[in-house]
């Protein structure tokens, strides 16, 4: 049995749909259940439902054999994981956003940036030659420029609805992100047959990096 870590929320739903199509699940976990571990009756996979930022850690530390995690999270964390395959789900983009009219050339001597992605954000602004102060937050990123905590934000954008609702707009896209299937190193040796079968079942959507 493979243990697979999935991020809670929309990406978990898309991942489960994909696994149903590929025959790895016989049914959906109960959406009303509070249980964080789901064992499929087929006995082929066990699912751990965790925060999106924690998926890669569970896999890297061998608490899960594999995981489905956003490319943005993988780049931010620099995890030691193998075989990142693009599953072409969970599409979004990591962008710089700010109040309407704000731009990267607005003239601040030091740009204050609120984000959950300090490493990616810092690298982006440094490559632009822009001096920045990173303010790390864990939620409600859009609030930061509204109350003067930051000049702009770096955050994931899907439809842009949350930005518009808070009078913010995208300034520049840093990167596109989709969900990747990753494995820890030991799973390739201790569960070689299961890993091989799992990868083969995703052959139609595989996009090797």
Image (tube, rainbow, N blue to C red):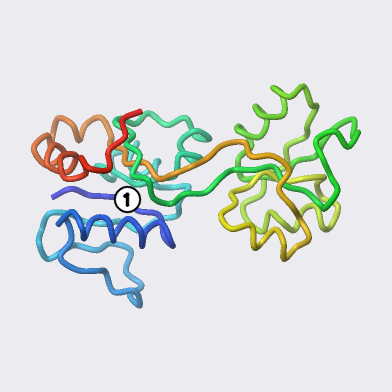
Q: Residue furthest front?
A: 204
Quarter occupied by residue 162: bottom right
How many numbered dots are placed on residues in this image? 1
Q: Position of residue 20 (x, y in %)?
A: 21, 60
Query: Which residue is at 35% across, 53% downward?
Result: 6
Q: Position of residue 36 (x, y in %)?
A: 33, 63
User: Is 194 placed left or right of 35 in the picture?
Assistant: left
Q: Residue furthest bottom?
A: 32
Q: Residue 158 or 129: which is nearer the viewer?
A: 158
Query: Which residue is at 78% across, 31% downward?
Result: 132
Q: Position of residue 189 (x, y in %)?
A: 14, 30
User: Is 202 placed left or right of 172 in the picture?
Assistant: left
User: Is 197 placed left or right of 165 in the picture?
Assistant: left
Q: Position of residue 152 (x, y in %)?
A: 77, 45
Query: Which residue is at 18% across, 54% downward?
Result: 22
Circle 1 — which element? strand
Name the residue carrying label 1: 5
Query: Which residue is at 90% across, 30% downward?
Result: 109
Q: Residues within 10 Å of mark 1 (few under 14, many from 20)?
A: many
- Relative to 20, say whether 117 is above or below: above
Quarter occupied by residue 186: top left
Q: Which of the image's four quarters has the C terminus?
A: top left
- Relative to 86, say whether 51 is above or below: below
């Amino acid at each position: 049995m493979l243990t697979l870590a999935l991020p809670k929320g929309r990406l978990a739903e898309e991942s489960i749909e994909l696994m149903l199509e590929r025959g790895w699940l016989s049914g959906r976990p109960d959406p009303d259940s509070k249980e964080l571990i789901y064992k499929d009756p087929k006995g082929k996979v066990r699912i751990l439902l965790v925060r999106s930022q924690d998926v890669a850690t569970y896999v890297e530390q061998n608490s899960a054999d594999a995981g489905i995690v956003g490319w943005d999270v993988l780049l931010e964390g620099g995890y030691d994981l193998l075989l990142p395959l693009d599953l072409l789900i969970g599409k979004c983009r990591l962008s710089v956003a700010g109040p309407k009219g704000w731009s990267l050339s607005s003239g601040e001597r030091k740009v204050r940036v609120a984000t959950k992605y300090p490493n990616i954000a810092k690298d982006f602004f440094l490559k632009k030659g822009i001096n920045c102060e990173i303010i790390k937050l864990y939620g409600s990123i859009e609030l930061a420029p509204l109350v003067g905590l930051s000049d702009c934000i770096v955050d994931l954008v899907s439809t842009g609805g949350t930005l518009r609702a808070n009078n913010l707009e995208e300034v520049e896209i840093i990167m596109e992100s989709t969900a990747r299937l990753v494995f820890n190193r030991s799973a390739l040796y201790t569960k070689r047959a299961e890993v091989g079968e799992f990868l083969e079942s995703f052959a139609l959507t595989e996009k090797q990096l």
